[in-house]
Image (spheres, rainbow, N blue to C red):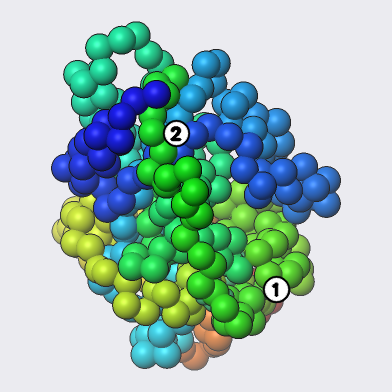
């Protein structure tokens, strides 16, 4: 067992590398992990087969010889209104989509991975004995949120996310699994931070698709994040209207959470919304002739993107996970909910973009486009 001084050194080192918080925990089977098989058996994971990896229910099996997990937290709360903000500009003639806050800037996998790799390098300088260390950002057979709780970084809220009293929930988690036997951040008799949700149920009531089966339990198949990013087929009819203008992910159950009201804002350049500047040479192409942003992107712009444009513009962005056809499908749903009607300024132009998608050989895309056309007339 290493000394507490080593643990404090790792936490400090993580902060030097730019993480907001860091905690260490033994690789153990914590109570929440035991609920996973039942959650999967109920079918709540939908098409996310990777969640069925049995190693996710027991950190002891996540890596040979694993002893400890280092959990690092990075705030991405950039300064922009929340999706639930009533002051958000709504201009029906220029319908816009909502991209989840975490995906506005550079792909968080890359940003966190770089910092975690640097932390592993530091470990190699401090600890001279042979050891294994693997850094993961959402890619490991591990449930980061649960380990983060037992590393003392927060509690698991009714919206199923990790909440921290100071930081709210707009943060990413990255982990390092290691064979080093490190002293946990929480002492032997210390409990993880208490659940401060109390009698609040704002997230449960605000979810537009009623994805929470009960407090602390989500049916991911009903969640807009799943529907817009993970689901490859058609969006089921019953979720189309409730989806509103979401084209990639959803922030509502975080936006309404009181713990995010005073969450600190970050100015990390990589997490600011990507802006594509207006370029004269883009005129006549589907690349932006005017400035476009991933914060409330115009649906007309999104619907006009070719697959080649998509690959080019979303390189190094988390949005690429939805793939071009997923983003187009979602943009059709958002357009169908936009309230755009004949006679409004851009109606004709947007309609002709969707008509092109309606004759696509891709049946999911074609049907989504026809749905949008039926709604905007
Ligand atoms: S992300 Fe949106 S759809 Fe998913 S549970 Fe939260 S509020 Fe509901
Ligand atoms: S909105 Fe309320 S119930 Fe939901 S996670 Fe936040 S504090 Fe907990």
Q: Label 2: which residue?
A: 69
The residues bearing labels 1 and 2 have C-alpha atoms spaced at a distance of 34 Å
Residue occupying the point 32% across, 71% down: 263
The answer to whether residue 261 is seen in the rendering is yes
Q: Does the residue labelled 1 lie within 8 Å of ligand 1?
A: yes
Residue occupying the point 57% across, 78% down: 198
Q: In which quarter of the image is residue 221?
A: bottom right
Q: In which quarter of the image is residue 374?
A: bottom right
Q: Quadrant of residue 297?
A: bottom left
- Choose between 139 and 33: the one closer to the eye: 33
- Residue 115's place in the image compared with 22, above or below, is above
Q: Position of residue 63 (x, y in %)?
A: 54, 21
The answer to whether residue 249 is seen in the rendering is no
Q: Is residue 367 left or right of residue 182?
A: right
- Residue 5's place in the image compared with 318, above or below, is above
Q: Where is residue 317 in the image (x, y as percent from the top left)?
A: 36, 46
Q: Name the secondary structure under disc 2.
A: strand
- Choose between 310 and 113: the one closer to the eye: 113
Q: Label 1: which residue?
A: 210
Image quarter hosting the C terminus: bottom right
Q: Quadrant of ligand 1?
A: bottom right
Q: Position of residue 261 (x, y in %)?
A: 37, 79
- Choose between 93 and 132: the one closer to the eye: 132
Q: Name the secondary structure under disc 1.
A: loop
Q: In this view, does 20 lie to the left or right of 311?
A: left
Residue occupying the point 68% across, 57% down: 220
């Amino acid at each position: 067992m290493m000394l507490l001084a080593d643990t404090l050194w790792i936490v400090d080192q993580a902060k030097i590398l730019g993480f907001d918080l860091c905690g260490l925990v033994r690789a153990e089977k914590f109570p929440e992990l035991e609920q996973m098989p039942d959650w999967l058996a109920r079918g709540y994971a939908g098409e996310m087969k990777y969640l069925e990896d049995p190693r996710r229910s027991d950190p002891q099996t996540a890596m040979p010889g694993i002893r400890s997990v280092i959990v690092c937290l990075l705030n991405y709360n950039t300064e922009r209104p929340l999706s639930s903000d009533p002051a958000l500009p709504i201009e029906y003639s220029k319908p816009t989509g909502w991209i989840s806050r975490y995906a506005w800037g550079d792909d968080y996998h890359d940003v966190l991975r770089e910092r975690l790799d640097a932390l592993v390098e530091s470990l190699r300088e401090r600890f001279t004995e042979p050891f294994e260390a693997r850094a993961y950002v959402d890619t490991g057979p591990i449930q980061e949120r649960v380990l983060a709780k037992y590393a003392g970084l927060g509690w698991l809220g009714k919206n199923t996310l990790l909440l921290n009293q100071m930081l709210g929930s707009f943060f990413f988690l990255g982990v390092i699994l290691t064979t080093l036997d490190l002293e946990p951040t929480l002492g032997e008799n210390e409990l993880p931070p208490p659940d401060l949700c109390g009698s609040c149920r704002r997230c449960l009531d605000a979810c537009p698709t009623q994805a929470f089966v009960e407090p602390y339990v989500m049916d991911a198949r009903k969640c807009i994040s799943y529907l817009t990013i993970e689901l490859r087929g058609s969006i089921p009819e019953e979720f189309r209207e409730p989806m509103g203008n979401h084209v990639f992910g959803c922030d509502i159950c975080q936006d309404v959470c009181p713990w995010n009201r005073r969450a600190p804002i970050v100015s990390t350049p990589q997490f600011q919304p990507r802006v594509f500047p207006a370029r004269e040479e883009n005129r006549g192409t589907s690349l932006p002739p005017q400035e476009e942003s991933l914060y409330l992107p115009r649906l007309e712009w999104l619907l006009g993107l070719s697959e080649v444009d998509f690959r080019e513009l979303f390189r190094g962005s988390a949005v690429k996970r939805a793939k071009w056809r997923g983003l187009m499908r979602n943009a059709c749903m958002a357009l169908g909910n936009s309230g755009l009607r004949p006679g409004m300024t851009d109606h004709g132009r947007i309609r002709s973009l969707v008509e092109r998608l309606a004759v696509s050989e891709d049946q999911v895309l074609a049907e989504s486009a026809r749905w949008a056309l039926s709604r905007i007339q």
